[in-house]
Amino acid sequence: MIPEGRQSFDLMSPTQSRIAPLQDEVNRAIDDLLASFPDPDRLSFDERRGIIARYTAVLEGNFIYWMTAAYLACVSAEAHAIIHENLLEEVRDNHPGMLRRFATDAHAVPTDSDALAVYRSLQSVRLYVGRLSGVKIVLMMAFFEGWITRFMPYLAELAKRQGSAEYEYTDVHGECDVVHTQELFRALEGEMTLTPVPLPPATELLEGVGLLRTLIRSIVHNS
Ligand SMILES: [Fe+2]
């Protein structure tokens, strides 16, 4: 059976059929991560605080920077238009401010030790982004948006248990990032169309997804 939103391989353009296995890989990585998260019932106040704080330490100052890197690295008009729209929404609607409010109301403003806990894996993603490969960064960001969307109910649950009633950040990102993820896969298609063949192997294209997975594990498991 063809998954919803996916075409039969016979109906796909050559670029779409190169993206489909990458999209499957991204979805599998997100499923694996979510399955590894601890049950909120078993977490103490400090453990819940730590997850929200480390998430905030990573996202607040880096999301727009990484999406800007994707914009700078891309060459296709399609990818530029899609990423421009994404950045516009982030800046215009003050998403970093929204996240800061979420963390503050959940008593989880990041501390020095929260920043230190994610430092090493964050640096690896920064170095990767600095190589400015359009296809690779867009694929990494499509994974990031997809994971963020599916992480929002968990994050909101942690905040609720911290006594917070501030859910604007989780509400907005649980909805808009579904569209953003689909759009980023369209941007990837635009970039791939302009990338000379043969493309690097999937393992190389997915390196950024692997680095982000490590970073997300540091956020959630403090490891
Ligand atoms: Fe955002």
Image: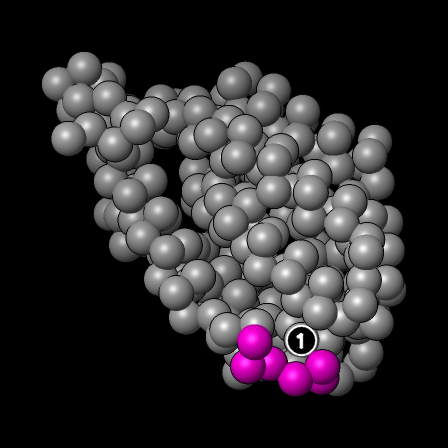
- The spot of residue 77 in percent (x, y) is 54, 17
Label 1 residue near ligand 1, CB within 8 Å? no
| Tag 1 secondary structure | helix
Q: Which residues are magenta?
A: 41-46
Looking at the picture, the colour scheme in use is: one colour
The answer to whether residue 74 shows anywhere in this view is no
Report whether 108 appears left or right of 201.
Answer: right
Amino acid found under the numbered disc labelled 1: Arg
- The spot of residue 144 in percent (x, y) is 52, 49
Q: Residue at x 53, y 35 (%)?
A: 178
Q: Quadrant of residue 118?
A: bottom right
- The spot of residue 30 in percent (x, y) is 41, 54
Q: Quadrant of residue 22?
A: top left
Q: Residue at x 44, y 42 (%)?
A: 139
- The spot of residue 103 in percent (x, y) is 80, 63
60 in relation to 21, above or below: below
113 in relation to 143, above or below: below
Q: Quadrant of residue 159?
A: bottom right
33 in relation to 140, above or below: below
Overall secondary structure of the magenta stretch?
helix
The answer to whether residue 151 shows anywhere in this view is yes
User: According to the image, label 1 marks what residue?
Assistant: 48
Q: Residue at x 24, y 40 (%)?
A: 21
1 in relation to 140, above or below: above
On whether residue 74 falls in the magenta region, the answer is no
Position of the N terminus by quadrant: top left
Pick whichever, 130 or 58, lies toward us: 58
Report whether 1 appears left or right of 15.
Answer: left
Q: Residue at x 28, y 43 (%)?
A: 24
What crowding class fits label 1: few (fewer than 14 Cα within 10 Å), some (14-19), or many (20 or more)?
A: many
Report whether 187 appears left or right of 180.
Answer: left
User: Total label count?
Assistant: 1
